[in-house]
Image: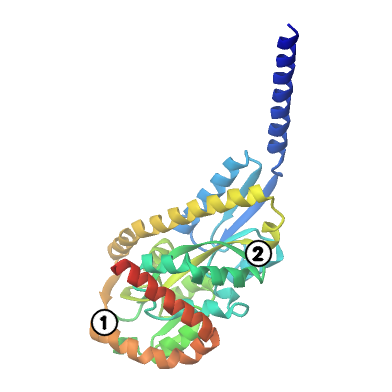
Amino acid sequence: MKFKRIVAMTVLSAMAGFATVGSVQAQEFKDRNLRFGHGMADNHPAGQAAKKFSAEIQEATGGKTKISVIANQALGPDPQMLGALQGGVQEFYTGSALGMLGQVKELGFQDVPFLFESEAEAHAVFDGPVGDYLNKKLSAVGIHVLGWWENGFRHITNSRRPVNTLADLKGLKLRTQPNPLTLDAFKALGANASPLAWSELFVALETGSFDGQENPIVLMNTQRFYEVQKYMTLSGHVYSPLIFAVSKKFWDGLTPEEQSIMTTAAKNATDYQRELTASEVEVALENMKAEGMQVTSFSEQDLQKIRELVPPAIAPHLEKIGPEFMTLLQAEIAAVRASTKS
């Protein structure tokens, strides 16, 4: 009997211990109401992936961490949201990283024409040493990268005329990314290139302040650019990623367990976002055609002319980005290509 009482007491003590651990674990997550801002439409793959990430975090924390996903630059333009991340005012963001170009010069490489041959090649580079290099640079200025999402290859649209040859670009007023490298590349091709805030672009195209722009297919479709643009040229001149990031100030205040949960959820969201974007490209293109957009492509001869004209124009910018980083980038691209061909 004495033995049974000892066993029973031991079991009860163990159960009490488990209950204590369980209650500590349940209390380990603080009640948090966080914000995830981006500039795309709510139905863009990035918007959908942001909501997936939010739902997974809420479930993993027993409902204690809630993340509101806020689309269409309702929290401000991309540079403002990136600044809010640095200050810890906004917790999560996805969109262009070029607002950080003044602090992380290496980000300028994103607009180097014809750098990548495929989305898979770009993913492998961003997920490897090149991504690690950029992530460290961004961490040093207050932004913790959770992943690099898919935006896709950029193509040219305009409302004035079909652009079937390089000569057809001459004189078109095109909105481009706010990257001096991009501006000089398009000017070398004869276009009148100027930067413009993303939030102002649709109205600028609608009023004719700009003739055209260049962006990935899915983004153009979800933003309904076919309502204000008639002609598309499938140029595929630049691969454009989206940064998926969290405020480092906020990140550093999380427990290791919370960081682990967010890292796992971020990886899941990244895989989902890339797959979703890939599945929507053809659908988006066909929809824009159905809406009246005329789609053409450059000939191989014109593409070759572009490859000859652009390098001298962007050479000074590559020097500013830095030989060390460009050497790393080119080596990684070569390594990825070699591995896929072997």
x and y percentages locating residue 318 in the rendered image: 49, 87
Q: Is residue 182 visible?
A: yes
Q: Position of residue 155 (x, y in %)?
A: 36, 74
Residue placed at 42% from the left, 87% from the top?
185
Apparent side of residue 324 relative to residue 153 in the rendered image (left or right): right
In the image, 322 versus 141, the foreground residue is 322
Question: Mark on residue 164?
Answer: 1
Give the image quarter of residue 89.
Answer: bottom right
Observer able to see residue 154: no
Name the residue that disc number 2 marks.
Answer: 85
Q: Quadrant of the rendered structure where residue 38 is?
A: bottom right
Q: Is residue 338 above or below residue 3?
A: below
Residue drawn at x 36%, y 91% is 309
Left/right of residue 302 with respect to residue 314 in the rendered view: left
Residue 87 position, x and y percent, is 71, 66
Q: Classify mark 2: helix, strand or loop.
A: helix
Q: Nearer the viewer, mark 2 or mark 1?
A: 2
Residue at 60% across, 69% down: 136
Instruction: Name the residue nearer the viewer: 104 or 199.
Output: 104
Q: Quadrant of the N terminus?
A: top right
Which part of the image, by quadrant, shows the C terminus?
bottom left
Q: What scheme was used to colour the molecule? A: rainbow
> x, y percentage for residue 58?
59, 43
In terms of image quadrants, where is residue 161? bottom left
Three-letter amino acid code at the position of disc 2: Leu
* Element type at mark 1: loop
Please tell me which residue lies in front, 286 or 254. 254
Pointer 2 or 1: first along the chain? 2
Q: Is residue 218 above or below residue 265?
A: below
Which circle marks residue 41 in the picture?
A: none
Callout 1: 10 Å neighbours few (<14), some, many (20+)? some
Q: CA distance from mark 2 to mark 1?
A: 42 Å
